Image: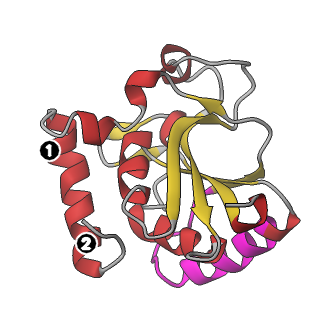
Amino acid sequence: MSKEESQVAILGGGCFWCVEAVFERVDGVIDVISGYAGGHTKNPTYKDVTSGNTGHAEVCEITFDTKLISYDEILDVFWQAHDPTTLNRQGNDYGTQYRSAIYYKNDSQKKSVEKSILKAKKMFDDPITTEIKKLDKFYKAEVYHQDYFENNPNVPYCTFVIAPKLNKLKKKGTIWD
C-alpha cells in the first residue's frame, strides 16, 4: 500500500487499551499503536505519564486504508467510543492522561476535525471537552501496553471495562467482532 492510500489519526479517549481495542475492530484500520502525545516531556514512560507531570495523554496512533475508511469516518467512531464531555476522565479512569484528545497532523485533518466536532456537539447534551491540537510528537508506549486486550482478555479491567464497551459498539454496528 502506498502512503497516499494510508493515513494516520492520533486519538485519545481515556485509557489507550480501550481505544486500541475499539479501533482494532474497525474495517479499514491497518494498525493501532498505543502511546503518548500532547505533553512536554521527551520520551515519557508510562510511570512518567501517570504521574500527571508530563502533560501527555494516553493516545493511539491509528493507521488506516483511505480506500476503505476515511478520516471523517474514523472520527465518527471516536465520538461513539467514549464520552468526550467528561474532563480528564473516562469512567473510573481519571487524570489529565485520560483526557479526550484529537491531535491532527495537517490542515486537511484539522478541517475534518472542525467539521466533525460540530456534528458531535449534536450527539451530546453536555459541552465537549476534547482537546484539539496539532500533533507535536507521538511516543510509542511500552511493549506490554501494545495489543493489551488481545493479550490479556481475562484481566479484570478488560473483562469489566473494555469487553462491555466493545459489546455496545458491536450492537450499534460500529465495530466488528
Instruction: Give percent across and percent down for residue 126.
Output: 48, 71
Describe residue 142's horizontal placement relative to residue 113 as left or right.
Answer: left
Q: Which region shows up in magenta?
A: 109-130
Q: Is residue 54 above or below residue 136?
A: above
Q: Secondary structure at mark 2?
A: helix
Q: Is residue 38 above or below residue 117?
A: above
The circle drawn on residue 107 is: none
Let me know if residue 119 is in the magenta part. yes
Which amino acid type corresponds to the residue marked 2 in the rendered image?
A: Lys
Colour mapping used in the image:
secondary structure
In this rendered view, identify the residue nearer to me: 45 or 114: 45
Describe residue 153's horizontal placement relative to residue 144 as left or right.
Answer: left
Q: Residue lying furthest front in this view?
A: 1
Residue visible at 24% across and 65% down in the picture: 177
Circle nearer the N terminus (1, 2): 1
The quadrant in which residue 175 appears is bottom left
Q: Secondary structure at mark 1?
A: helix
Q: Is residue 163 above or below residue 52?
A: below
Q: Mark 2 highlights which residue?
A: 170
In this rendered view, identify the residue nearer to me: 140 or 95: 140
The N terminus: image quadrant: bottom right
Describe residue 93's horizontal placement relative to residue 127 as left or right.
Answer: left
Q: Mark 1 highlights which residue?
A: 159
Instruction: Give percent across and percent down for residue 125.
Output: 45, 77
| Classed neighbour count for the residue bearing mark 2: other residues with Cα under 10 Å, few (<14), some (14–19), many (≥20) | some
Q: Residue lying furthest right in this view?
A: 107
Residue visible at 42% across and 48% down in the picture: 20
In this rendered view, identify the residue nearer to me: 92 or 35: 35
Proximity of marks 1 and 2: CB atoms separated by less than 8 Å: no
Q: How many angstroms separate mark 1 from mark 2 (CA)? A: 16 Å
Which amino acid type corresponds to the residue marked 1 in the rendered image?
A: Thr
